Amino acid sequence: MEVKSQSRIELIDSLRGFALLGIILVNITFFTTSLQTISYGVDLWSGWYNELAMLLRGIVINGKFVLIFSFLFGFGMVLLQESSQAKGRSFNRIYFRRLTALLLFGLLHGIFIWYGDILTHYALMGFLLMLFQRCKPRTMLIWSLILLLIVPVLVTGASLLSSTAGQALEPMSQADARQIGVYYQERDAAIYGEGTVAQMTIQRVNDFIGSIFNMLLFYPQILGMFLMGAYFCKRRFLHKIQENRKGILRLVLIGGSVGLVLQLVISLTKKGLPFWGEAAALFVGAPLLALAYIGTFALLYQHKLWKKVLHWFSYPGKMAFTNYLLQSVLCGLIFYSYGLGWYGKIEPVLQMLIAVGIFALQAVFSRVWFNWLPIGPLEYVWRLFTYWGNPLNRGEKGKAASVHEAP
């Protein structure tokens, strides 16, 4: 069994922290805007700076960082499998308990804190990921590509068979869509921004159920990125950056250029794309760009000056489970009625500044936490579930374990 180097562990933790920043930059909008309003594509804010901020977020951030998180989830599965085998433990029992606990946390998060929970979906897809644990790297790669491409291929095929398929996403005029979106925004602002805890809970449960159905279309993509991360781990691409530098650089150049073009097309096409065009941008462009981000981050991490900066992402990354849920708690305190009640009152530019501020505080908080304790608080609880007690082995300082214990 290959000994894992400290620099490699820092890279994975830093990548996870980097993904957390991108995730809150996207998620914060869902804390202050109705889910239905977002679904109808209604822009509530005017001003060139808000339009520019939303455009850049759509091109560079939306949908990419949750895929990095998904990639790292699959990567971590292989690491935990190797660690369990090296210690003579049953991986299946450990991972089953781990996913069951994650599912429980996700349900509690979605029902009582924020409806946009991703942990529930990761847990469900994680059970399917277990079916691939004994596959060879090449098999994992093939299945990853199939799952990542299945939705755009099916959509394109349906579009070719039916001339009306491309119009399926536009059953109403933009004026009607805006009117409906504004209605839902005002309704949700009255509930989340001014309502009682009971009213918010009922609406949150309804939105949670709705978001689960919305995510079903993305399940193949999530599982596909899980398998891509597992493939990278089995092939040791991120274990030995210098040895794989040429391949990673090709991934950055090809994935980054193609992915960026597809994201530019979907973001700059004002009148909308046909169904198959949107599917290609969402299900091909976003994963390519996410992989390019991973490769770029890994290459930059090999330089001393860049590493000093990027290393700060490792602190929130080591306790990503805690920080992900903490982001929801803090956003609830800012935007919901039991806190400041700023729901629907903060424009996109300020939303993003608040998100960056929250993440900066988390980075400092995490850095201070690890000066005193070796593992994050919710990571500790998660390990209690996973290992039936004994959350920290004697002599373990949390550094090596952090790779395995973040969602």
Image: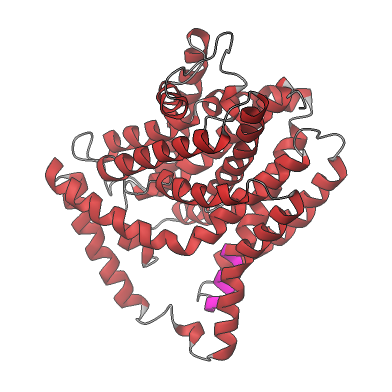
Classify 252 as above or below 257: above
Query: Residue 253: image x %, image y %?
Result: 79, 52
Q: Is residue 393 visible?
A: yes
Query: Residue 208: image x %, image y %?
Result: 30, 53
Classify 279 as above or below 162: above
Number of marks in the image?
A: 0
Quarter containing the N terminus: top right
Q: Nearer the viewer, residue 5 or 53?
A: 5
Q: Nearer the viewer, residue 186 or 287?
A: 287
- Quarter of the image for residue 197 reads top left
Classify 103 as above or below 312: below
On the picture, is 165 further left or further right than 184? right
- Quarter of the image for residue 145 reads bottom right
Query: Residue 37: image x %, image y %?
Result: 32, 62
The question of residue 281 being in magenta is answered with yes
- At horizontal 24% and vertical 40% (from top left) the residue drawn is 336
On the picture, is 399 further left or further right than 372? right
Name the chief secondary structure element in magenta. helix
Q: Is residue 407 visible?
A: no
- At horizontal 49% and vertical 18% (from top left) the residue drawn is 375
Query: Residue 300: image x %, image y %?
Result: 75, 34
Residue bounds of the magenta highlight: 273-282
The question of residue 126 being in magenta is answered with no
- Colour mode? secondary structure
Classify 258 as above or below 197: below
- At horizontal 84% and vertical 40% (from top left) the residue drawn is 244
- At horizontal 61% and vertical 52% (from top left) the residue drawn is 225
